[in-house]
Image: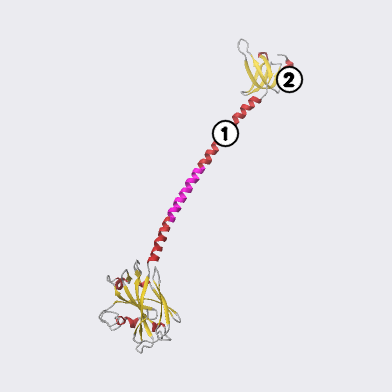
Amino acid sequence: MEKKYMERLVGKYCKIVTKEPGEEKASVVTGTLEDVDYKDGFVLIDSSRGLGCLRIDTIIAIKPKSKVKTQIKHKKSLIKKEEAMVGIGTLIVFIAMVLIAAVAAAVLINTSETLQSRAKTVGTATIREVSAGVAIESITGYTNINKTKIEYLALTVRPRAGSKDIDIGLCTLSVLYNNLSILTLNESLVQQVNTDNKSVFEVPITSGSSYTILDNVSSIKFGVISIHDPDLSVTTTYGMNSGDRIIIIVNLSAILTLEGGLPPRETVSGMLTPEIGIKAQYDTTAPAVFSKRIVNLS
C-alpha cells in the first residue's frame, strides 16, 4: 500500500480490508481513518467498536465508503426506540384515564346515593305535608244574653282524610277582624263533651266544676272540647287522629275588646294552622238578626 493513498483518506469513512500473516481469510473493518503513523507502521481507526489501531503492513485494501446505510440503520434503531417511548407514554395516559374514570365513577355513585337519600327524605316530607292537615266542618256562634253580639265561636275541626296524627298543642289559630290575633291551646282547657249538659258551651273545666271552658278562654288562648275521641288521645296527649272531632272555643269578646264581640252583618275570618300539613281557613259573616243565642254561621 503506497503512502500517498493513505494520506488522502485521513478523516474519511473507509472500508479497510486486512489480512494477518498466516491467516487464510481477510477481515473487514469500517470506520473513520483518523491518522497514519508511517514511522511506527500503524493507522488509527474510529469504528463502531471504538478507537483502534491497525498495522499498515496487514492492510490489503482500503476504500472510502458512504455512511448512508449505517445512518439508515441508526435511524431505524432510533425509530424503534421512539416507538417504544410512544408506547410507554400511551400506556401511562391509558392508566391515568382509567384512574380518572374510576375516581369519577366513585364520585358519581356517592353523589347518586346522597341524592337518592335526600330525594327519599324530601318525598316523604312532601307526602306528609300534602296528606296531613285539618278541616273546619262547621262554625257556630254564641251570643250575649241580649242577643246583640256574638261573644264566642265554636269551630268543629277534624283531621283530613288520610292525615297522620295532629298535635293540637302545636296548632295556631288566627282571628282577623280589625286586628290580627293569634291564639294557641290552653292545655288546662281540654275536656270531653258531657252529654248530660244542655250545650257544649257549658262543658266544665273538670267534672263537677262550676267553671266552664267558655268562661276561661282568653284573647290569646283557646279551649278544646272533644266530641268524638274513642282512644282518648285528645284529652290525654292533645293528639287528634283519624276519626276524631273536636270543637275549638274562641272568646271573641276578649279579642274584639272595643266591640265586645262580633256585631250583626260583620265578618270575621282566620286560619287554623297545624304543625305539618294543610291549613284550614274560615270566613264567616254574622246574620242581621240573632233570633237565638246559638247561631249557625257555617
Relative to 281, say whether 19 is above or below.
above
x then y, percent, for residue 178: 45, 82
Please state which of residues 48 and 269 is positioned toward the viewer in this rendering: 269
Relative vertical location of residue 54 with respect to residue 273 in this rendering, above or below: above
Rendered image: mark on residue 108? none
Q: Quadrant of the C terminus?
A: bottom left
Q: Residue at x 51, y 41 (%)?
A: 94
Magenta stretch mostly in which secondary structure?
A: helix
Mark 2 neighbour density, 10 Å: few (under 14) some (14–19) many (20 or more):
few
Quadrant (top left, top right, bottom left, bottom right) of the N terminus: top right
Residue at 64% across, 25% down: 69
- Eye-nearest disc, 1 or 2: 1
Q: Secondary structure at mark 1?
A: helix
Query: What residue is shown at x 62% (from left), y 28% (from top)?
Result: 74
Q: Provide the residue designation for mark 1.
A: 83
Residue 227: percent from left, percent from top:
29, 75
Disc 1 crowd rating (10 Å Cα; few below 14, some 14-19, many 20+) is few
Q: Is residue 26 left or right of residue 174?
A: right
Segment tinted magenta in the rendering: 96-115
Residue 283 image-quadrant placement: bottom left
- The answer to which of marks 1 and 2 sits earlier in the sequence is 2
Residue position marked by numbered label 2 in the rendering: 8
